[in-house]
């Protein structure tokens, strides 16, 4: 005898529920999480080094957590900014999950932290599916990666609250086409804001810090169309586990 | 390759259901949206790995792929976003506000074979 049992459960329901709880818990403590996503080497750490310094220079209590498959190099670089930094080694896992983040924050996140930057594992595919309880999700791409990346990684760009183009000091050398890039971003995430930075020249860093601080203070964030579940989709969160 | 963690989560879900209802799992049906960030082939492969040593060892994974569809709220037009995606209303030439389908990543059903007495 065979039978079919209907279950209809989101596979990531557990992560979604945990992320939601973490977001609420952190909000109650006054902390906003900024989740940084990009492919390996797009310049997350280099930008963050300056953004950390810039954020704390404004008197905003800042901390950072960086996730990598291996090595503590990024944490060592970020610690130079003087803000509390923690390295997470994912042990081969290609992304951070909410449960992992929560464990890492326990007993470490300094009281009064207003902005916690999380540098996700360098990867444009996997981290996109995992909500970490962030208030602001930033997807970054460097000018050397090519204008078509938003089309190749639609989920990563489609779910971003803000898209940052990095290494703009190299834009001219590689003949980067900004208009084409902007058009591709708009295809997958209409209305999302685009920012540009160069960790080399410092261009755009202050504006980015400004943006983050505004969000941490309760300013609104963009709602990506991809994040808005339409009527035909089931409710992924809140289903019993 | 997060497909392995996803496959593991699917196996866990199926095991829970099997424990609750009793019986041996012969198949797991899932729906994977085009914008879920999951590659169906990689998921099938990962499932083979994830079931090893579990009660689902001989179970099959049946993947239903869901094309992404968006909706333009003002005019009500629903449309396939295509690949590469274009979240733009073909009728009134403005951005779509919501994705109606295409981000699913869900277990829809478990097929069980009742244990023979
Ligand atoms: N010219 C230029 N080079 C940059 C810039 N930002 C980063 N780089 C270089 O790009 C390389 C990678 O930068 P990282 O900051 O390590 O990149 P990442 O995204 O943190 O890398 P992973 O953590 O490994 O994913 C380094 O050699 C940096 O010096 C920039 O704005 N301009
Ligand atoms: Mg880094
Ligand atoms: Zn329309």
Image (cartoon, coloured by chain):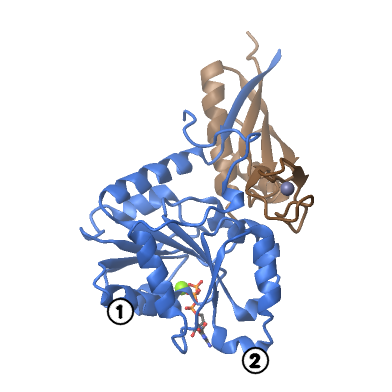
Chain colours: A blue, B brown
Residue B2: where, in percent of width, then height? 57, 53
Q: Residue at x 47, y 88 (%)?
A: A200
In which chain is the residue bearing label 1?
Answer: A
Would you name the residue on which mark 1 appears?
A81
CB-based contact (under 8 Å), mark 1 and mark 2: no
Q: Residue at x 71, y 40 (%)?
A: B76
Tell me which corner region of the image, top left, top right, bottom left or bottom right, holds residue B61: top right
Q: Nearer the viewer, mark 1 or mark 2?
A: 2
Give the number of the disc on residue A7: none
Tell me which corner region of the image, top left, top right, bottom left or bottom right, holds residue A134: bottom left
Nearer-N-terminus badge (1/2): 1
Give the number of the disc on residue A173: 2
Report the side of A121 relative to B88 (left or right).
left
Residue A42: where, in percent of width, then height? 54, 75
Q: Residue at x 68, y 37 (%)?
A: B31
Does residue B95 sit above or below A239 in this rendering? Answer: below
Does residue A79 sit above or below B62 in this rendering? Answer: below
């Amino acid at each position: 005898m065979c039978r079919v049992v209907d279950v209809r459960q989101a596979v990531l329901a557990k992560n979604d529920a945990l992320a939601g709880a973490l977001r609420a818990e952190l909000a109650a403590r006054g902390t906003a999480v900024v989740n940084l996503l990009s492919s390996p080497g797009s310049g997350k750490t280099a930008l963050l080094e300056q953004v950390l310094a810039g954020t704390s220079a404004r008197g905003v209590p800042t901390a950072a957590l960086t996730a990598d498959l291996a090595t503590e190099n990024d944490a060592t670089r970020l610690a130079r900014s003087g803000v509390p930094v923690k390295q997470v080694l994912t042990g081969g896992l290609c992304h951070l999950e909410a449960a992992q983040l929560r464990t890492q924050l326990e007993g470490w996140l300094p009281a009064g932290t207003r902005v916690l930057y999380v540098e996700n594992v360098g990867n444009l595919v996997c981290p996109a599916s995992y909500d970490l309880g962030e208030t602001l999700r930033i997807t970054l791409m460097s000018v050397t990666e090519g204008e078509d990346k938003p089309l190749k990684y639609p989920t990563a760009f489609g779910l971003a609250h803000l898209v940052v183009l990095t290494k703009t000091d190299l834009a001219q050398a590689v003949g980067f086409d900004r208009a084409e890039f902007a058009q591709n971003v708009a295809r997958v995430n209409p209305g999302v804001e685009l920012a540009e930075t160069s960790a080399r020249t410092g261009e755009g860093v202050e504006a980015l810090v400004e943006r983050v601080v505004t969000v941490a203070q309760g300013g609104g964030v963009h709602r990506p169309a991809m994040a808005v579940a339409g009527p035909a989709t089931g409710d992924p969160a809140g289903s019993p586990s | 390759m997060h497909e392995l963690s996803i496959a593991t989560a699917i196996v866990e879900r199926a095991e829970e259901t099997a424990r609750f209802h009793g019986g041996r799992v012969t198949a797991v049906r899932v729906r994977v949206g085009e914008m879920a960030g999951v590659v169906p082939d990689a998921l099938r492969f990962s499932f083979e790995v994830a079931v090893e040593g579990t009660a689902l060892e001989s179970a099959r994974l049946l993947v239903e792929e869901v094309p992404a569809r968006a909706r333009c709220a003002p005019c009500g037009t629903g449309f396939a976003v295509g690949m590469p995606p274009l979240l733009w209303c073909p009728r009134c030439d403005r951005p779509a506000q919501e994705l109606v389908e295409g981000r699913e990543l869900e277990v829809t059903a478990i097929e069980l074979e009742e244990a023979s007495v």
